[in-house]
Amino acid sequence: MSENKVLATVNGKEITDKEVYNFLNQLAPQTAAQFNTPEGINKLATELVNQELLYLEAVEDGLDKEENFKSQLESVKENVLKQYAINKLFENISVSEEEIQNFYNENKEYFKTPESARASHVLVDDEEKAKEILEEINNGLSFEDAATKYSSCPSKQNGGDLGEFTRGKMVPEFEEAAFAMEEGEISEPVKSQFGYHIIKLSSKKESRISALEEVKNQINQQLVMMKQQEKYLNKAEELKNKYDVKTYF
């Protein structure tokens, strides 16, 4: 649709496609997806027509003069004004490149990516069975086929692949063995509380500190939030000296 195309008029008031799309954008994503079609847009336009009709009748019936309405309107106005005042307070807050760089330099430990590994395994209950399977692998059976055929772990559906994990995610015996291995290496049977594991290490990543460019947006957002919090609290303390405040907690 072209922007501001008139879709309907109610008592001379135009309802445009821009209003319909604004209405669409206010819906929850899952609900909005159901209306993001030509047919759905027409339904939303009909809904806006219906709402306008109810508004006209409400004005005609003097509902806007009722005390209950005035009370609700005042409450909404108060909440909107509070948020507007907060937004005005924050509107000039910004973060410089130097501030981002300094925060990164002073807090590099927070941007540390832990050591990780990716491994597959074949899990069986019996050590002798594990040794027999390992011999089959050494004689040419692919590790993935061995896992699919013999493993008692649900990961057998993926050829034994356990995905990527960091320290502390696996049982200690498995973890110790996996992180001590070289990429592509297959272990001897490793005993844990779950049974005997034959482990294949797919890859291993050393612990590292993320580069500034990787975390720049994250730092910017954090610094903005910190500045907003500081400005908000300082302003509140300032206003306590201007207005009468009594607390009972």
Image (spheres, rainbow, N blue to C red):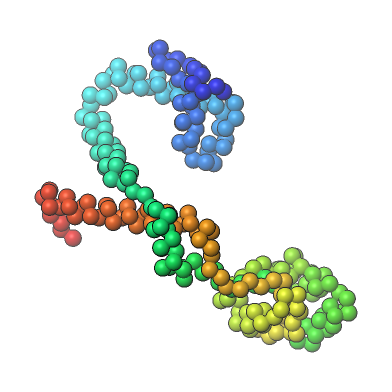
Residue that appears at 80% across and 85% down: 131
- Name the residue at the right extreme: 139
Q: Quadrant of the C terminus?
A: bottom left
Whether residue 75 sits left or right of residue 201 in the image: it is left
The residue nearer to you, when weighing 152 against 203, is 203
Quadrant of the image occupied by residue 195: bottom right
- In the displayed orientation, state which residue is furthest to the front: 98
The residue sitting at the bottom extreme is: 128
Answer with left or right where residue 188 lies relative to residue 96. right
| Point 40% across, 21% down: residue | 52
Res. 243 in view: yes
- Give the percent coordinates (x, y) of residue 143: 80, 73
In the rendering, at what x and y percent does residue 153 appear?
71, 72
Picture quadrant where residue 233 is located: bottom left
Q: Is residue 134 left or right of residue 30?
A: right
Q: Nearer the viewer, residue 79 or 70?
A: 79
